[in-house]
Image (cartoon, grey):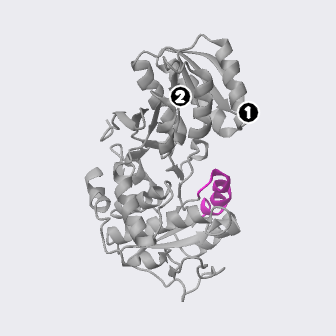
Amino acid sequence: MLAYLKRGLFALALATGLAACQVIPGGGEVQPGTQGPAATPEPSETALPVDTSRHRVALLVPMSGSNAEVGRSIANATTMALLDTSAENLRITTYDTATGAESAAARAIADGNRLILGPLTRENVEAVLSKARPANVPLITFSNDASVAAPTVFVMGHVPEQSVERTVGYATGHGSRNFAALIPNGEYGRRAREALAAAVANDGGRLVAVESYDRGNTSILSAAERLKAKGGFDTVLIADGARLSAMAAGALRDPQALVPKILGTELWSGEAGIADATAMRGALFSAVSDARYRQFVDSYRARFGQAPFRIATLGYDSVLLTLRVARDWKPGTPFPTRNLLAKDGFLGLDGPFRFRADGVGERAMEVREVRNGTIAVVEAAPQKFD
């Protein structure tokens, strides 16, 4: 299965004549700065002709509102995947969740779509599921929240718990024993804290101190000072973005000895500026490999005149995944979700991935270290699953 998807990964150097327009699946060609065709509230034979040889797949992402650029980036990536693989057996139609996730799902179901790619956020999953579940239409969501996974909801986003687990495993293997953490208040912080506690216990370490804070310059610095006063730890997880993490590290560490060891999460991925912070030298974090992503960015930029959002790879890979499953999927029949549970997984732009039985996507991640002005891979991501 991994080998099958390779042909779509390296076909990114196709003709670049599309750069003058943004191609949105099911929405025609949209000139930059304009809106696409208005969505039809009821199925229309003119807008969506009957297919007997193609699978109808709905893409549910925000195409208007505050997240419109993210949604458009994902939609453009799905189009790239269709072009790069010369796929002729899929019809992907985009529905705007910003105007109402439940109504977008209702229209997608009425139009005969048998699979939904999306939605983008966990807040929209339940609304989409209320229409998709009765129709036996599964979701492959771009959310990274494992709590929304279900027998018909497959979570494709990069789950932060996996990043924490990978980094802690590497750190304990290189001498870390006593852990502490700076955790922002909120859902992300809760998940990071629970992941840290589980990973440390599993690897034989101790979680000796945790300080929480409201996101902000002053709050994280105060929390770092409180944590430093407690002492007794050799390693600290800072579950925040690169800028605030660098500030906290500066308050925690001896600038000469660079102790304690600093760990981060996948939020640092793509933040090149983190390598310029002296206090972050030697810090570790884990993320999916960027090797194929760089090639994808070049092709995307040539076509659309701008760089994609990092999450756009999920749109591309969801098409590769659908094409793989479509080999055993007869048009007009229910999507065979059992085929998503292949033990050896699938290969995408973000490397190998597979879905566990609970619907959570499992990713192969590499461990990176912040060095003097650079970020180096210190342990490569596995090339396949056991």
Crowding at dot 1, Cα within 10 Å, few <14 / some 14-19 / many 20+, comes out as some
* Mark 1: secondary structure: helix
Depth check: give the residue in front, 2 or 268. Answer: 268
- In the image, what residue occupies the spot 45% across and 79% down? 20
In the rendered image, residue 122 lying in the magenta stretch gets the answer: yes
Q: Which residues are magenta?
A: 120-135
Q: Nearer the viewer, residue 210 or 94?
A: 210
Residue at the image point whose x is 57% and y is 61% from the top:
70
Q: How far across and down, in percent of the image, does residue 238 sit?
A: 59, 30
Q: Position of residue 258 (x, y in %)?
A: 49, 20
- Residue 358 x, y percent position in the rendering: 51, 42
Q: Is residue 32 left or right of residue 103?
A: left
Where is the C terminus found, in terms of image quarters? top left
At horizontal 47% and vertical 16% (from top left) the residue drawn is 176
**Above or below 287: residue 116:** below
Residue 340 inside the magenta-drawn segment: no
Dominant secondary structure, magenta: helix
- Tag 2: residue type? Ala
Q: Is residue 320 visible?
A: no
Nearer to the camera, 121 or 54: 121
What distance separates the C-alpha of mark 2 from that of mark 1? 18 Å
* Left/right of residue 264 with respect to residue 184 in the rendered view: left
Which amino acid, by three-letter code, is at mark 1? Thr
Sequence-wise, the earlier of marks 2 and 1 is 1
Q: Quadrant of residue 233?
A: top right
Q: Position of residue 166 (x, y in %)?
A: 44, 31
Q: What mark, if any, has residue 218 been given in the picture? A: 1
Q: Which mark is residue 279?
A: 2
Q: Taking 82 as reference, is 165 above or below it?
A: above
